[in-house]
Image (cartoon, helix red, strand yellow):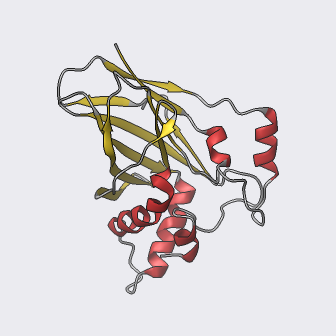
């Protein structure tokens, strides 16, 4: 796999000369509740934009001994690289970060002209959304990639038992200064730590 991809999990060659972001991903999130009503995992589907997809496919082809694109190989490598970055997810309980377990369920496939990555991120310890405030965000900390839930694909909840919980999406509220700082960055600059969080949506699990 491309060295730049290994270095920043999803990063291939930058796709624009100036400013962040360089690529876009449409996100679909499904919160999994156990039979006891605990948040046990979050299922993610990421749909890459067509230009970024083309760059990924080109990288897969160049790295393949037979110069053949094997889309299914992408998931295993990128999931391994995403591990140290928390799979580009921040989950909190009462505003305190909680740990994810190791992702073992994943796949990559084409959806039309776009690459789709799907995986299930288990929580190291299930959370009780009735007793505690549970929220999460999906984002690239460097903001090379802009990640958002599409208007037709809001976060949902899948429960193995009865549940009164719902997912509520809170849009980001970056300031004009935040936009200016992101736009001013070019390829030669290292983004500030966790710049992407300023542009990240927050999903709240609310239960009656």
**Left/right of residue 58 with respect to residue 32 in the rendered view:** right
Residue 22 location (% of width, % of height) = 65, 55
Instruction: Find residue 155 and report its image quarter.
Output: top left
In the image as oriented, which residue stretches furthest toward the bottom? 65
Give the quadrant of the C terminus.
top left
Q: Which residue is drawn at 50% across and 51% down?
A: 88
87 or 176: nearer the eye?
87
Q: How many marks?
A: 0
**Left/right of residue 85 with respect to residue 15 in the rendered view:** left
Residue 170 location (% of width, % of height) = 54, 26
In this rendering, is residue 87 above or below 10?
above
In this rendering, is residue 91 above or below 86?
above
Instruction: Find residue 204 and report its image quarter.
Output: top left
Residue 184 location (% of width, % of height) = 82, 51
In this rendering, is residue 58 above or below 140?
below
66 or 123: nearer the eye?
123
Q: Which residue is drawn at 53% across and 51% down?
A: 49
120 or 19: nearer the eye?
120
Residue 141 location (% of width, % of height) = 60, 51
**Left/right of residue 8 with respect to residue 81 in the rendered view:** right
Instruction: Find residue 42 and report its image quarter.
Output: top left
């Amino acid at each position: 796999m491309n060295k730049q991809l290994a270095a920043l999990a999803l990063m291939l060659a930058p796709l624009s000369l100036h400013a962040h972001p360089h690529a876009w991903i449409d996100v679909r999130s499904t919160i999994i509740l156990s039979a006891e009503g605990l948040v046990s995992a979050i299922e993610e589907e990421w749909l890459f934009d067509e230009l970024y997809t083309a760059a990924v496919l080109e990288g897969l082809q160049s790295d393949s001994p037979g110069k053949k694109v094997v889309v299914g190989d992408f998931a295993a490598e990128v999931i391994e690289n995403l591990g140290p970055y928390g799979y580009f997810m921040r989950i909190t309980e009462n505003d305190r970060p909680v740990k994810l377990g190791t992702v073992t369920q994943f796949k990559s496939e084409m959806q039309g002209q776009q690459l789709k990555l799907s995986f299930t991120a288990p929580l190291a310890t299930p959370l009780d959304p009735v007793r505690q405030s549970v929220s999460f965000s999906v984002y690239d900390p460097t903001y090379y990639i802009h990640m958002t839930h599409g208007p037709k694909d809001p976060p949902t909840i899948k429960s193995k038992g009865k549940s009164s919980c719902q997912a509520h999406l809170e849009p980001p509220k970056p300031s004009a200064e935040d936009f200016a700082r992101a736009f001013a960055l070019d390829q030669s600059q290292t983004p500030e730590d966790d710049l992407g969080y300023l542009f990240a949506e927050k999903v709240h699990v609310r239960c009656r």
